[in-house]
Amino acid sequence: MRIIACEPDSWFLFENEGSLLFNVNCNYGPVGYDFTIELTIEEKKEFKIKGKHFLQSLANLIDYSTPISRDSASPYKGRSVDERYSALMAELIREWQSELKNT
């Protein structure tokens, strides 16, 4: 797994064995949380066409839809892959942050 794009304090895009994993920094009232989905084929196409602009729009849609809320009707709610990848993504983000501090 590797980081291929990011907007610090907003989102990270990871590549993992051909899959694109999109990790979004979300807020729900006073609570901050990460929410990660695997991009669909259609979302991958949009990313190739629109680049980071698409990712920022998608991050906003995910955040505003509040997928962690019990009452949320978010279309992203059932797409979370956080349990599977959160530890590895957190480690890669820490390494990335450390490299930034050393440059």
Image: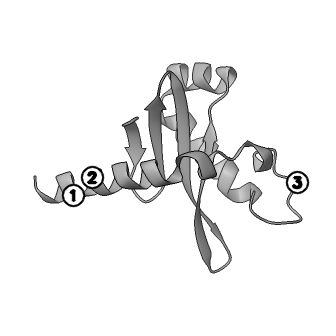
Residue 47, above or below 86: above
Instruction: Estimate the x, y position of residue 75 in percent, counting from the top left.
Output: 81, 44
Is 6 situated left or right of 36 in this image?
left
Residue at 10% x, 52% y is: 103
Q: State the CA–CA distance, disc 3 to disc 1.
A: 37 Å
Number of numbered labels in the structure image: 3
Query: Which amino acid type corresponds to the residue marked 1 in the rendered image?
Result: Ser
Residue at 66% x, 20% y is: 41
Q: Which residue is mark 3?
A: 73
Query: Which amino acid type corresponds to the residue marked 2 in the rendered image?
Result: Glu
Question: Which residue lies most toward the left here?
Answer: 103
Residue 95, label in figure:
2
Q: State the CA–CA distance, disc 2 to disc 3.
A: 35 Å
Discs 1, 2 touching: Cβ within 8 Å: yes
Residue 15, above or below 74: above
Earlier residue among tags 2 and 3: 3
Residue at 62% x, 35% y is: 38
Residue 39, above or below 57: above
Mark 1, other Cα within 10 Å: few <14 / some 14–19 / many ≥20? few
| 17 and 13: which is toward the camera | 17
Instruction: Estimate the x, y position of residue 51 in percent, counting from the top left.
Output: 48, 28
Q: Secondary structure at mark 2?
A: helix
Q: Secondary structure at mark 3?
A: loop
Residue at 69% x, 47% y is: 80
Residue 98, label in figure:
1
Residue 88, label in figure:
none
Q: Secondary structure at mark 1?
A: helix
